[in-house]
Every structure is written in C-alpha cells, then in structure tokens.
Amino acid sequence: MSFKKLGLNDLLLKAIEEKGYTDPSVIQEKAIPQILAGKDVLASAQTGTGKTAGFSLPLVQILAENPKEGRRQIKALILTPTRELAAQVYDEVRSFAAYTKLETAVIFGGVKQASQVARLKQGVDILVATPGRLLDLYQQKLLKLHQVNFLILDEADRMLDMGFIRDIRKILSFLPEQKQSLLFSATFSPEIKKLASTFLQDPVTVAAAPENTTAELVNQKIYRVDKTRKTELIIKLIWENNWHQVLVFTRTKHGANRLAQKFQKKKITAAAIHGNKTQNARTKALEGFKSGEVSVLVATDIAARGLDIPLLPYVINFEIPNIPEDYVHRIGRTARAGASGDAISLVSADELNYLKDIEKLLGVKLPKETVEGFEPEETEPVAPPSQKKKSVNFRKKRSNNNRFKKR
Ligand code: AMP
C-alpha cells in the first residue's frame, strides 16, 4: 500500500517523501481514508504506531483543499495531554503543511504566554494545545474557537488519567456543534468510551493493534529480583551490555532523581525527567538523550508521555506501574515504527500483584526470569487456596512479614 492510494494529494506526498516515510503504517492505512471521507474516528493506537501522521496528514489535506475567505481563524484544534507531546505533534503537522498556506501554532503551560499570544495574533489555522493553557487563553479572550470545525483528542486516556476531563468538557462546550472529531487513545476504559460517545458522531473505529495489546515487536522480559538489589541489577545490565538510549521508568519523581544520581556515580551518563523539572530542564535532558550525550533517561510516567524518540531500543521498568495501562504506554516507547526493542521489568515480590493485573489486561502470561547472582530471596506472597479475595490476603501476609515491614 502506498500513501498515494490512501487518497493523499501531491502536496502531502511531497512532504511525506521529505520526511522519508515510504509506506504507511497500519493505523495510517486504516485511519487516513476514513478521515478524508469526513468520518468521525475512534482510533486505538499507542505511541510508536505512526498515529500522529495518521491524523495530521488528512487534516492538513482537508483544510488545504477547503480554504476560507477572510481573516485567518482557528479551524482545527488538536488537544494533547503534555507539553512534550504538543511540541512533537506541532512539528509533525508543520512539516506536513510545508507546501500549503496553512499556519500552525502550539500553546502549552509552564512557559510565559506572551510569545504564544503574539503568534496567535498573526493568525492560525491549526492549533495544537494542552487543555490548561488553551482554557486560560480562551478565558482571557486571547483566542477564538467559534470557527473550529475539526477536533482531535490525542492520547485521550492519558488526558483522563491526568485529570483533564473537566477541562475537556469545558472546551467541548465552546466548540461549534458541527465539526469532524477524532479521538486517539492507546487504551479504552469505560470512561474513554463514555467521553467518546459524548462528542463523536457515528464514529468509525480503527485500531493499530487490538485494544489494550502491546506492540508485537516488543521483546518483553520480566526479571524477578529483590527490591533492595534492583539498583545493582539495573547498573549491571546497562554497564555490562553497554546499552545506550535506555529509558528507565520509576514510580516517583524522587525515585527518578535518586536513580539518575546513582547512575552518574557509576559513570553512566543519566538525566531525570519529571513534572518537578522546568520545561527547560526537560527539553535539555531530552535533547541530550536524543543526541546520545546522555545514555539513560530516568522518567516518571507523566513526563515520558509523548516523548518521541524514534527507534528507542531499551525500556526498563525499574518499578512496574500499578496502573496496568501505563505498562502498555511505557513499553510502547520501544519497537517504534516497525523496529524491534526490549522492554525489561524488574519485579520484586511486592509487585507481583501488579504484574498479574498487567497480564490480565494483555491477555498473556509474561514468563519470569532471573539473572544469575540476583535470584530473589524475598518470599513471594502466596494466597491460601481456600480464600477468594487474593489481594486482601496478600496484604495480610505482607504485614506479618518482617522483611516487608522494614521497607
Ligand atoms: P507516533 O506514533 O505518531 O508517535 O510516531 C512514531 C514514530 O514513527 C515517529 O518518529 C514518526 O516520525 C515515525 N513514523 C510515522 N509514520 C511513519 C511511516 N509511515 N514510516 C516511517 N516512520 C513513520
């Protein structure tokens, strides 16, 4: 299948060629014709599937083919959960619009609004925004939304996780009824489905992979290890295998800082990226990582959202997430756009229940391995077979166990 067969015009094909894309990805193949046909779309696609181009290409084509007379007004709104994702989506949209007359801009919080406001004043067709800054500028009457006839919610599941539901509802209430809407999400909880039903009209459903499954090319490994030995093990893995471009996930911001410092002590170049860091520090850490100056980037889930690092070879879960969907997002950082990658999770006894939840979501068992010299000594919490409520029993067992109490 070629991009041309999807119905894209020469201006877009030229931009695609310059980006170096030769064949459309699965989500692009499925979504582009539907969007070009004017349909509302509910798309199941995680990062790494090429979803951004999946919505940007048809969006740019539709707007370019239907120019409006008069003053330039915002016609398309793309909402993303994080500033990093907003910046990336903006870059991609802009490169696809390179041969059109469309103007694109991006706005997000954490930086001063002045330059964003100045840009908006020049006239914008496509606006990429995070919900908070959008509402802020809208309420200050610094932007108008009455001409928006195209709405895209990107990574909608993450927006709900981050508590943006009220902002989204508010924004929806400011938009015209008559519009084409797309919702992209990696996972589909009942809340997402409910949100989708409030603004998508007769949506076509497209999926890059079946709902809640992980990229086939990701080589998932589970290493059982004692909690107290995780740092030692992760350093050994990275050091001895000479891994570069490793994205490590921790559950907390402090955990990310601490671990990055431990890497640095061992002369592994590392940086931490999380919500307490300034936008500048985040951008700098990401640039260092992309350029290869920094080998290991330690991140929390929210900060890692939307990081676009093509061909990331290694993702390590220093702690596995307690929200199973986060696991899907995290390992979606590797094996991007058709390349294969390793996703390694270091799992201590107290995390085995989280692992079970992940396996349940994925519908597969993830075989557990051990690394020589790191065989766990912690006792695994085992539920007595006669009791049904496993999680309650685990907790009881844990509180009776001095090993767990100490931690
Ligand atoms: P996304 O899922 O939108 O975050 O895209 C993941 C990565 O795949 C980005 O680095 C894109 O530049 C890249 N990409 C998107 N579409 C294609 C394609 N058709 N061929 C090759 N790379 C692509």
Image: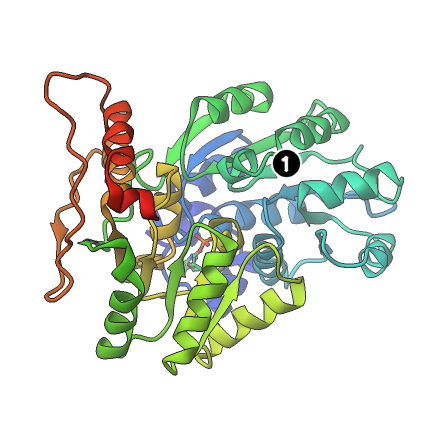
Residue under the image location 47 percent in, 50 percent down: 301
**Which quarter of the picture shows residue 321?**
top left
Q: Position of residue 181 (x, y in %)?
A: 59, 31
Q: Position of residue 166 (x, y in %)?
A: 67, 28
104 up-or-down from 373: above or below: above
* In the image, the residue with mark 1 has its CB under 8 Å from the nearest atom of ligand 1: no
316 up-or-down from 7: above or below: below
| Residue 280 placement, left or right of 55 | right
> Mark 1: which amino acid?
Leu
Q: Position of residue 274 (x, y in %)?
A: 55, 57
| Residue 75 placement, left or right of 48 | right
Secondary-structure class at tag 1: strand
Residue on which the image places disc 1? 151
In this rendered view, identify the residue nearer to me: 23 or 92.
92
Residue under the image location 61 percent in, 31 percent down: 180
In this rendered view, identify the residue nearer to me: 77 or 404.
404
Report the label total: 1
| Residue 223 placement, left or right of 26 | left
Residue under the image location 68 percent in, 47 percent down: 129
**Which quarter of the picture shows residue 117?**
bottom right
